[in-house]
Amino acid sequence: MRVAIVGVGQTKFGELWDKGFRDIVIEAGIEALEDANLSGDEIEALYIGNMSGGRYLGQEHISALIADYSGLTELHIPSVRVETGDASGGSALREAYLAVLSGMYDVVIAAGAEKVTDVGPELAMDIMASTADREWEGFVGATLPALYALIAKMHMERYSTREEDLAMVAVKNHKNAINNPKAQFRREISIDTVMNSPYIAEPLKVFDCAPISDGASVVILASEEMARKLTDTPVYIDSIVQASDYVALQSREDITTMKSVVYSARKAYKLSRISPNDVDVAEVHDSFTIAEIMAYEDLGFCKKGEGAKLIREGETEIGGRIPVNPSGGLKACGHAVGATGIRQAVEITLQLRGDAGKRQVDAEIGLALNIGGTGGTAVVTIFRR
Amino acid sequence: MRVAIVGVGQTKFGELWDKGFRDIVIEAGIEALEDANLSGDEIEALYIGNMSGGRYLGQEHISALIADYSGLTELHIPSVRVETGDASGGSALREAYLAVLSGMYDVVIAAGAEKVTDVGPELAMDIMASTADREWEGFVGATLPALYALIAKMHMERYSTREEDLAMVAVKNHKNAINNPKAQFRREISIDTVMNSPYIAEPLKVFDCAPISDGASVVILASEEMARKLTDTPVYIDSIVQASDYVALQSREDITTMKSVVYSARKAYKLSRISPNDVDVAEVHDSFTIAEIMAYEDLGFCKKGEGAKLIREGETEIGGRIPVNPSGGLKACGHAVGATGIRQAVEITLQLRGDAGKRQVDAEIGLALNIGGTGGTAVVTIFRR
């Protein structure tokens, strides 16, 4: 049995001061229901990727809260929060997929949502650091930018990757976001913008880091049979694989590769009987520019150590051999933490349906890579129209 | 296809000052693996019910952390945290069940764990309140005991339930816990102990409230075919149903019933083709004594309003018509929040296998009820040997 995406919705990502957590989930949900031409009472189960409602909002148990505010309470449908750091959205998608695959449900919502700007930047940074190993990394002061800076340093040392190469990732993603009405930063930047921005954790500068954003994204999944009734343009989840790795960098043999990504990508390609060359479009987890470079390598879009070459030669631009992050990625579309994995699925769905407007690429097979922390979790999804 | 429990393990519940979060999960996991006669590398996926690693430990992304500390990292298996307030354990069990049912996995671990005593009691209380509606209840000062006190008041008013009836629940559960080596409180108490204890939120006194505890519980699930190879005493999950309800009490038509419980129980009975009378043993969510009285009614063990009569007549004692909480329940075994739903599954499994020692009841069909907050989420599971 196959599982299809039959509807997508999302809020704009950014600093959504005028909206509460409940509001943004509902906004994205209504858009998805309208897109699928479904009413709420046809939804049989809810999955919500959310990293830290507890610390950002003082609210755990948001699963029931969302079912409540969706007006679905009288149906008493099950609603579950799924959390794997900032891979929560990808994991929620996978749980929703398994729920349909189990035969228990025909129509299920996978949502992702995070409201981060209600706390100040220092606390927000500490909350993000809680996706790394608190005891071995966080307590000694390592933030996520610091950890990714270590990774970048090692990658630069070993593979001659330059700061300018990292900058090119940010430039490409900002350029793509101009054509994404839901993106947080819709303005072009230059290599100089990035290179002249201050260091956050050397070699990573302000413009090497994705923002953390408010936002919500929703996809509606249906069994193949139901999908055929609902839409002429289903997008199938061909395979979805999640993998874990050591959480603390110190435990890893090599920090310039993420084994969770390598493993989940290989397995997904195998399940989908494709090779990396068959992927027409990808959304990857560029929480930091170095992460996109490593994703090229770990997903097999190029050989290990040649990620920088790929961005230099323009192969991952729209129009290139394998366009990556046509949405603008986490860097420019924004990183609404638990929403990101679902937002990636929204983008790939739009791309495969031909609904991506000015950022449309020609694609039959799409891939999404969502990462938790520094790679303790990775979720790779292969989509097919 | 049916799904079976083939191994169980759990730590003692209580104030585990000498152990860290990672330690307790591993301890319970090893016990479960030994019980199932499996080695760790046969596990294909991990689900972890945990309510608030973020606030209790400053650690999100505990899913990967547990995979890491389990020594399973090199296998890169998927590990997912599931959260629905203090129903997180029940929800993790359900996700693990769906994962096996999907055909994707043959052997999956469902764990539950919480380490709560590393923060002080005031903060711990606030964290528990985050399972209620933060904006409509928590911010105006309503703690969980306060909300359950409102429920108890209304129940007493409408159904002539007395404080002494509530006390009898605590007395029964303490008595049962004496024979549970994993229980937090293994000493008998009297009605006077409860009645003379100070009010926390009238009419609920200290001894009407379950403690919040450190602890971890693990069950290993397997497909029917695999279960037959692994054990002569599989316990089947016959049905597992999760339901939601309004999170804030103010939104509910009637606070003396939990619609999420009524709905999930009815559906579970229907799926299992049984009536409440067929249940031989039950573990229910007695976070407060009133919750056990209401559970009797909402699960259909008696008519609405007659819960107090059931406890008065001794029908829910070991040896009674329908023994409830032979483990000691949340009240005396302890309430390790996200672990509780899994601990209930452990107890029912031991009871159905005939491995419950001095607290053994004669049972073929068991039921577990795990609740999130004040009933925003309920998970009802029917087990069969």
Image (cartoon, coloured by chain):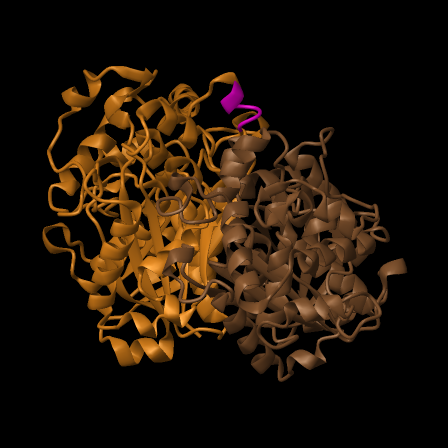
Chain colours: A brown, B orange
Q: A261 above or below A138?
A: below
Most prominent secondary structure in the magenta stretch? loop
Left or right of B175, for residue B298: right
> Percent position (x, y) of residue B10?
23, 53
Q: Residue at x 25, y 44 (%)?
A: B325
The answer to whether residue B371 of the structure is visible from this angle is yes
Residue range in magenta is: B134-139
* Image quarter hosting the C terminus of chain B: bottom left
Left or right of B61, for residue A200: right
> Percent position (x, y) of residue B113?
33, 48
Image quadrant assignment for residue A294: bottom right
Q: B291 above or below B32?
A: above
Near-viewer residue (B52 or A160): A160
Q: B44 above or below A13?
A: below
Image quadrant assignment for residue A37: bottom right
Does the magenta portion include B349?
Answer: no
